[in-house]
Each structure stands twice: as C-alpha cells, then as structure tokens.
Image: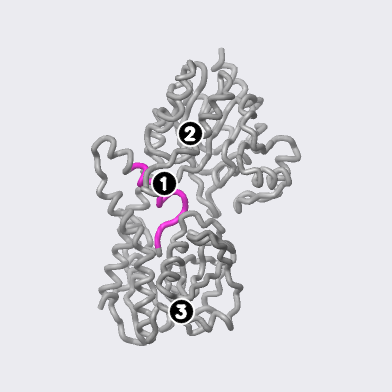
C-alpha cells in the first residue's frame, strides 16, 4: 500500500525529501531536514544560488556556510536547478515567494509554475507540502485540483498538506527547529504523513483539521501584528500632535501584568509577511462579499508611515531654518529589521525615494545591507562610516536600529537626528527628535502640525 510504504520510509528516514525554493524559508528548512537524518534535494531555478551552495557558500545570514558545506560534502544535501529531480522524490516542500501584484492582489505565479513542473514528473505516493504563505483555499485550488485532473486521487495516489513557514530572520532565540510548526492535511492520511515528516525535522508539530485552517492561522498571526502596529503608529502620530512621548506611554502601559501587549511604532512595516499577508486575507474575503475594514485601514496607516517620516523630517529641518530641498540627509539603516541584511519590503527603500524626489541629497549607511537597487534599477551603495563626514550632514534619519551603531557617537556629532525606533532612548540631547514625541527646539515643545 502506497501510504504504508511512504510512512515507513519517513520513519526510517530512507525517504528522499525535496525542497523547492532555497531562499529565506527553504534553505533553513533543508538544513534541518539534513540534521533530521534525510537526504535532501534542494531545487532552485537560480543557478547562482545552486553554485554557491555546491561550493559550501551560504547567502542566508541564519545559515552558516560551514553547515551547507558539510551537508553537501556528506552527500546528504543535493542542490540543483533541474525540476526533473522530482521523479526521485518521496516528499516535496514548496517554499517559493508569494508577492503581491502591482494592484495589491495575490501573485501565486511561483506556486503555479512549481505545480506545472510537479505535474510533469510526480510519481505516485508523493507527499506535497505547501509552505508559501497564501490565501485560504490555495492548497486545494492550485495543487489538489490540478493533480486530480491528471487522474490522481488525493489521499491515495498522492498526499497533500499545508504547513505555513514561520521564519523570523535574525531571531537569536527562535529558528526553524524550535518554532512550533502548524500542519493541515487534505485527508487524515495526508495529515499523518505530514506530521511524520516534520516530527523528524522540528521540535513541535501542531496538527490542525485542514489546509484551510493552517492557511488562515498564518494570516491571522501576521494580520494581528499589522493591525496592532497600525494602531500604535496612529497613536504615535496623535502623540506627536499633542507633544506627548509615545514611547513613555507604551512603557507605562506595559507595566500592566494582564490585558496588554506592547507594540511599537516605526517608519513603516517590512519583511515578506506583515506588509503582504493581510492583503491576501482581505482579497480572499471579497470573494465571499466580506470586506475587512480593519485590514484595509491598518494597511493604509502603515503604508503612509514613510510619508509621515518625510514630513516629520521637514518640520525638524524647519526648526533649524533649513528645507528638505538641497539638504544633505543620511538614512541610518536600510534593512527592514535590526542586525540583518534583508531588504524585502523595507520602508527605508520608499523613504529613500521620497527624500530623493523632494530634492534632498540623500545617502544611507548600513553595515549589513550594503547596496540596493532604486526604482530606476540603479545600484545605490552604502556610504562608509566616518564620523567627520557624518557631522557634515544636515540631518540623519534612523530607520533601522542596528545594535552595532555607535549611538552616543552619532548623537555627539550635533547633527539633528530623527529617531523612528527610539534607538536613542538613553541619550538626552536637543538634537534627538523621536517619532511620536512632538518636535522640540531647545526647551520648547513644538507639536507636529502646529
């Protein structure tokens, strides 16, 4: 029986497992599968990635090159750009991007592309697990129905699950192994096989009743964060008007031991999940004539934070009798979160363009994300850290609160600093202007918008 054969091979770890998409999700997962005792075939169409991996080089900060090198040299990890490898696989974990289109609709083209290749090469008895974040119903609509159209029956000829990724790049405490993994199968046997696979790979597996529940759980996690971040961003703008320190307000509220969870304002939201996932849910809900006001409002507030940072900077410069146009502006940090090089959906990218279009002479410094492409495709390089040069800027805008920044040294330069992350919290200086606190000129508080 196909089910029993696959179950046994998963238990004794003779199954050949595959990961399609070797990015921020797929490569860490592949390495955990190797650690779990499997021989892993990693498929990615980017031949440069494959070459790097074959040479024991990692392009993912959380995965050391030595780990990749050991996995490759042992023969337990086989990177390839050939989809024909699917013929050999007993399991396939799909970890490809799911961006939004220009119209803010889900772009599932990467999933569709992978499924088209699976249809060419799949063998009976294969377990397929979709990990790419997407809307509820994707696993059935884009995979189950497509394979059943070939005459295959889910739960008998192939097995299908959804298990949402929960990757948090740069997190020192939680990784692929020790982050609980939700999984939902199309049938009971699908779920059991999915649990069998991931029980060998992660510390805790959380089975749920269906792929739709698993898909929705991922969207809930990130929509929860999006809505709460939007609320505190709005509160920060309110506090700016009222010349109240929002950071002190949050600190005070967080002393309540129940019924409160701290969220913090910032220059916008970044990463793959929070800016995108809520829109997947909102888009799907409209199919059922349900319109989520919370999601749309939160997205609007968060999307407008880069513009708000520009306006706050303009008001700070005005205090110093300067304008945005022709001012030399240095953005401190460009990655979407501290201590990593990940630029996906970083608000810093939009803030850079907003300053440039406003006529500022804008540059940036980031020791991790050392270059990016602007909206015209031109490469923008980080400047080098040089206190003497930095002191010549008209203002600095803290975008990313990297721990490696010399905050006291930056403050001592005397340049006006717009702090969007409360990174200079311990430094009392007239030249530090924090988001959500109003604007001060020496000892005079000037509410934003006054």
Q: Which residue is denoted by mark 1 in the rendering? A: 100
Numbered badge on residue 112: 2
Instruction: State the extent of the magenta-drawn residues as a range.
Output: 268-281
Q: Is residue 291 above or below residue 323?
A: above
Whether tag 2 and tag 1 are in contact, CB under 8 A, the answer is no
- The correct choice, above or below, for 229 with respect to 54 in the image is below
Q: Nearer the viewer, residue 45 or 333?
A: 45
> Percent from the top left, x then y, of residue 76?
70, 35
Q: Residue furthest front?
A: 376
Mark closest to the chain's N terminus, 3 or 2: 2
Quote the CA–CA distance across marks 2 and 1.
Answer: 15 Å
Question: Is residue 249 highlighted in magenta?
Answer: no
Q: Secondary structure at mark 2?
A: helix
Which quadrant, please, contains the N terminus? top right
Mark 1 vs 3, N-terminal side: 1
Asked if residue 286 can be seen in this view, the reply is yes
Q: Who's the residue at 51% across and 64% down the image?
A: 334
Q: CA distance from mark 1 to mark 3?
A: 34 Å
Residue 81 in picture, x, y percent from top left:
64, 37
- Dot 3: element: strand
Residue 244 screen position, x and y as percent: 29, 73
The residue tagged 3 is: 395
């Amino acid at each position: 029986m196909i089910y029993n054969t696959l179950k046994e091979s998963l238990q004794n770890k003779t199954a050949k497992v595959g990961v399609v998409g070797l990015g921020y999700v797929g490569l860490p997962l592949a390495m955990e599968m190797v650690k779990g005792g499997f021989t892993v075939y990693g498929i990615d169409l980017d031949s440069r990635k494959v070459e790097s991996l074959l040479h024991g080089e990692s392009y993912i900060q959380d995965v050391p090159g030595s780990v990749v090198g050991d996995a490759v040299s042992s023969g337990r990890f086989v990177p390839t750009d050939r989809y024909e490898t699917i013929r050999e696989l007993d399991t396939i974990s799909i970890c490809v991007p799911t961006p939004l289109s220009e119209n803010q609709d889900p772009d599932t083209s990467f999933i569709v592309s992978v499924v088209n290749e699976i249809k060419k090469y799949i063998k009976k008895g294969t377990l397929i697990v979709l990990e790419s974040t997407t809307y509820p119903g994707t696993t059935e609509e884009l995979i189950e129905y497509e394979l059943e159209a070939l005459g295959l029956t889910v739960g008998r000829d192939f097995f299908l699950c959804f298990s949402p990724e929960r990757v948090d790049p740069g997190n020192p405490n939680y990784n692929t192994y020790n982050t609980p993994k939700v999984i939902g199968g199309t049938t009971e046997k699908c779920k059991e096989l999915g649990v069998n696979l991931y029980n060998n790979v992660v510390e805790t597996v959380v089975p749920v009743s269906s792929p739709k529940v698993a898909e929705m759980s991922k969207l809930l996690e990130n929509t929860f964060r999006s809505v709460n971040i939007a609320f505190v961003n709005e509160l920060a703008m309110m506090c700016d008007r009222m010349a109240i320190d929002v950071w002190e307000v949050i600190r005070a509220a967080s002393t309540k031991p129940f019924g409160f969870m701290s969220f913090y304002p910032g220059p916008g939201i970044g990463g793959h999940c929070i800016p995108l996932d809520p829109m997947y849910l909102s888009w799907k809900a409209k199919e059922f004539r349900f319109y989520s006001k919370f999601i749309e409002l939160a997205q609007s507030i968060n999307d407008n934070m880069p513009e708000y940072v520009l306006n706050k900077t303009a008001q700070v410069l005005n205090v110093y009798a300067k304008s945005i146009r022709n001012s030399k502006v240095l953005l401190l940090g460009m990655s979407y979160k501290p201590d990593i090089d990940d630029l996906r959906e970083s608000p810093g990218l939009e803030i850079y363009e907003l300053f440039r279009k406003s006529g500022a002479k804008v540059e940036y410094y980031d020791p991790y994300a050392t270059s990016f492409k602007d909206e015209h495709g031109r490469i923008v390089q980080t400047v080098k850290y040089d206190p003497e040069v930095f002191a010549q800027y008209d203002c600095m805008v803290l975008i990313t609160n990297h721990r490696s920044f010399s905050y006291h040294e930056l403050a001592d330069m005397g340049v006006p600093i717009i702090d969007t992350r409360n990174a200079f919290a311990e430094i009392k200086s007239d030249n530090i202007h924090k988001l959500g606190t109003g604007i001060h000129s020496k000892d005079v508080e000037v509410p934003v918008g006054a």
